[in-house]
């Protein structure tokens, strides 16, 4: 069964600090997909990034970067020079491929609450 | 406006009543999903649908019923609401299944008294 672990329940930083949110996943499938979502205080879920298991290239989008390492089953998310608007709950999620039997189920971690203080 | 909408946004109902949460998307996405979000549990899949008239159970389907007669609509019905169904419910849609990101509606906060 697929599983996503976000060990950090809450993180608090001061504005302009860099912060890394950890995500460790478990799957028996060789084809799978990883996602990060952001849930700001307003409550909506915002898609940030998708990664497939065959693409281990790191990705950078502005102040956001993602480090995908299959060897450690991790898909960590770094915010550089954090801002107050980054305050949110961040979810990592995993979806297995057709052979994984997950029936398109998106399994979420329990989320990390990031608070960026001014 | 294009996107995915949910109604109502807030609902208070009594134990034993039937309540239906609506979800509508304008992207013509094939897949639609219902999740519930509870403190300590994160998001859990209730039901999903791969296309009109095709639905299947997720992780926590008991007490819920879904239908999908049209591609754009995916209502979720609580046949006899219980207090344990107090939660925030999110609808989502996706172009395809596992390999594509899901886009979420704004959520419905349901309280069962």
Image (cartoon, coloured by chain):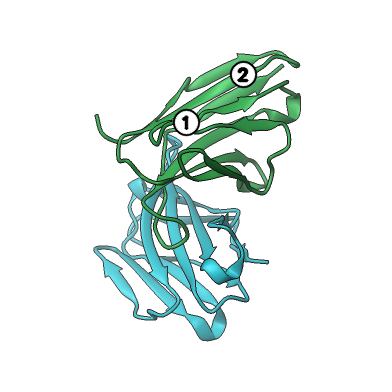
Residue A35, image x, y percentages:
44, 61
Q: Nearer the viewer, residue B92 or A76?
A: B92
Q: Mark 1 or mark 2: which is in front?
A: 1
Q: Tell me which chain the residue with mark 1 is part of.
A: B
Q: Which chain is cyan?
A: A
Residue in the image at 72% along x and 16% along y: B113
Q: Residue at x 53, y 57 (%)?
A: A104
Placement of A79 over or under B54, stated as above or below: below
Q: CA distance from mark 1 to mark 2?
A: 18 Å
Decide if residue A36 is on the left or right side of residue B59: left
Q: Residue B90 appears at what percent x and percent y?
A: 51, 37
Label 1 sits on residue: B69
Above or below, comparing residue B82 to residue A25 in the picture = above
* Residue at 50%, 75% in the rendered image: A31
- For the point 42% across and 66% down, which residue is it? A77
Q: Residue A67 falls in which quadrant of the image?
A: bottom left
Chain B tint as drawn: green
Q: Which residue is mark 2?
A: B19
Q: Secondary structure at mark 2?
A: strand
Q: Are marks 1 and 2 on the same chain?
A: yes
- Identify the mark at residue B110; answer none if there is no mark: none
Of all residues, the one furthest to the bottom in this rendering is A71
Please report whichever mark, 1 or 2, sits nearer to the chain's N-terminal start: 2
Q: Taking A83 as reference, is B45 left or right?
A: right
Rendered position, A78 above or below B8: below
State the residue in front, B84 or A83.
Answer: B84
Does residue A23 appear anywhere in the picture? Answer: no
């Amino acid at each position: 069964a697929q599983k996503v672990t976000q060990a950090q329940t809450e993180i608090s930083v001061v504005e302009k600090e860099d912060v890394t949110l950890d995500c460790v996943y478990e799957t028996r499938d060789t084809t799978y997909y990883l996602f990060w979502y952001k849930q700001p205080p307003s409550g909506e879920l915002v898609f940030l990034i998708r990664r497939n298991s065959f693409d281990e290239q790191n990705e950078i989008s502005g102040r956001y970067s993602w480090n995908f390492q299959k060897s450690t089953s991790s898909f960590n998310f770094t915010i550089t020079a954090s801002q107050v608007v980054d305050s949110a709950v961040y979810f990592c999620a995993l979806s297995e491929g057709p052979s994984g039997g997950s029936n398109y189920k998106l399994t979420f971690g329990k989320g990390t609450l990031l608070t960026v203080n001014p | 406006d294009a996107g995915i909408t949910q109604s109502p946004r807030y609902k208070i109902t009594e134990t034993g009543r039937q309540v239906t949460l609506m979800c509508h998307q304008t992207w013509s996405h094939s897949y639609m999903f219902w999740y519930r979000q509870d403190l300590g549990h994160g998001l859990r899949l209730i039901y999903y649908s791969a296309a009109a008239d095709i639905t299947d159970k997720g992780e926590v389907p008991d007490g819920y019923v879904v239908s999908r007669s049209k591609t754009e609509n995916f209502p979720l019905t609580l046949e006899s609401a219980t207090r344990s169904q107090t939660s925030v419910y999110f609808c989502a849609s996706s172009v395809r299944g596992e390999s594509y990101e899901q886009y979420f509606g704004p959520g419905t906060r349901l309280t069962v008294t």
